[in-house]
Image (spheres, rainbow, N blue to C red):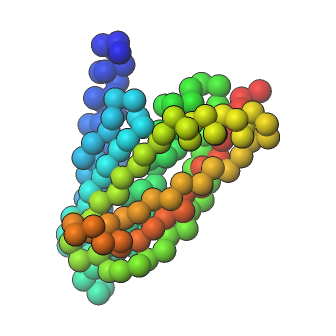
Amino acid sequence: MSTMFKLRQKFLEKAIRFYGPFLGAAVRPVKISDDYRYAKVEMPLTFYNRNYMGTQFGGSLYAMVDPWYMLMLIKNLGDEYIVWDKAATINFRKPGRGKVSAEFILTQEKIDEVKKIVGEKVKSDIHFLVEIKDEEGKLIADVDKIVYVRKKS
């Protein structure tokens, strides 16, 4: 890995901490792998991401998962592809009463699958399931994240 790439990655890791929705919700990236195939984020329960009922605000739960698969695909597919966040559905399973976290894993098999699908169809909506869990590993919410991918012409 080149020194320039390492510097860009370190800058991105630092800069993403100041991304408005993350900063406002106290979302903290814990780990971003060098190859952008794994990321983990955490969010403690604070006075500014707490809802009326004293639990994690749903918008903050969504914000913590929003950009990751788009970013990971951009970094792993390269300049030949256009990648955009398209939609998401969040299902709240249990109130978040403390620190919550989410992990994002992009396997080589998924990358190959995306390239194959987009190669055949020119464009496609790619689904990812993200689980948000509490410190005990209990499911707080799951998110069906849809990312639009198409090959550049």
Q: Position of residue 16 (x, y in %)?
A: 33, 42
The image position of residue 142, as x and y in percent, is 45, 68
Residue found 51% across the figure and 34% down from its top: 108
Residue at 43% x, 77% y is 92
Q: Quadrant of residue 60?
A: bottom left
Taking the spot 41% from the left edge, 49% from the top edge, the residue there is 104
Task: Using the rendered image of the protein, determine whether residue 23 is visible from the camera's viewpoint.
Answer: no
Q: Nearer the viewer, residue 57 or 31?
A: 31
Residue 38 is situated, as x and y percent measured from the top left of the image, at: 38, 41
Q: Quadrant of the N terminus?
A: top left
Say left or right for 14 vs 112.
left
* Quadrant occupied by the C terminus: top right
Specify the farthest residue to the top. Answer: 2
Residue 50 drawn at (x, y percent): 27, 75
Image quarter of residue 141: bottom left
Judging depth in this view, the residue of 56 and 119 nearest the camera is 119
Frontmost residue, 148 versus 117? 117
Q: Viewed as shown, does residue 27 lie left or right of 76?
A: left
Q: Hey, which quadrant is residue 33 in on the image?
A: top left
Query: Can residue 91 be seen at all in this image of the molecule?
Result: yes
53 with respect to 92 (left or right): left
Residue lying at the far front of the rendered structure: 109
- What number of labels is visible? 0
Above or below, 67 relative to 141 = above
The extreme right residue here reads: 121
Residue at 26% of width from left, 51% of height from top?
28
